[in-house]
Image (cartoon, rainbow, N blue to C red):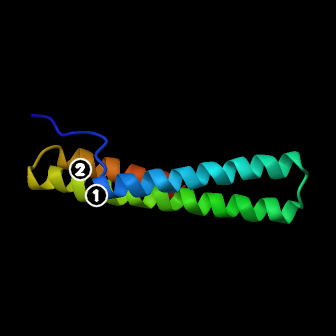
Amino acid sequence: MGQQHGYIKADDKDKLQNRLKRIEGQIRGLQRMVDEQAYCIDILTQISSSVSALEKVGTIVLQDHVEHCVRHSIENREDTEQKLQELTAAIERFLKV
């Protein structure tokens, strides 16, 4: 039996959906700010806030991946090396290394 992909804990799924909806609102706000030619510093502040919110979403997803996918692989001795390489690559992408 293969491992389920895309696993996110139920509690985290609700948190992620709520965060993503807030981020969506932030992005719409950014579009409005650009359209209304808001002060550049205010736009940059809003961009920074949106990036931070997305990073938090990424952190939750990464944590779920480690706690479920990587742990499952290690406990069941299935594709452990592949999962560790995948995790390393994901962290590098997430950190933009």
Q: Residue at x 67, y 54 (%)?
A: 26
The kind of residue tagged 2 is Cys
Q: Amino acid at mark 1?
A: Val
- Mark 2 vs 1: CB contact within 8 A: yes
Percent across and percent down for residue 74 are 14, 54
15, above or below 34, in the image: below
Q: Is residue 1 above or below residue 80?
A: above
Nearer to the camera, 47 or 24: 24
> Which quadrant, please, contains the N terminus?
top left
Quick check: 63 above or below 80?
below
The residue nearer to you, when weighing 53 against 73, is: 53
Horizontal arrangement in the rendering, residue 59 relative to residue 42 (left or right): left
Structural crowding at the residue carrying mark 1, measured as other residues with C-alpha within 10 Å and reported as few (<14), some (14–19) or many (≥20): some
Q: Which residue is mark 2?
A: 69
Tell me: 25 left or right of 83.
right
Which image quadrant for residue 68? bottom left
Please tell me whether mark 2 sits on a helix, a strand or a loop: helix
Q: Residue furthest top?
A: 1
| Residue matched to label 1 | 66
Residue placed at 31% from the left, 50% from the top?
Answer: 8
Q: Is residue 64 left or right of residue 48?
A: left
How far is the residue under mark 2 from the one under mark 1? 6 Å
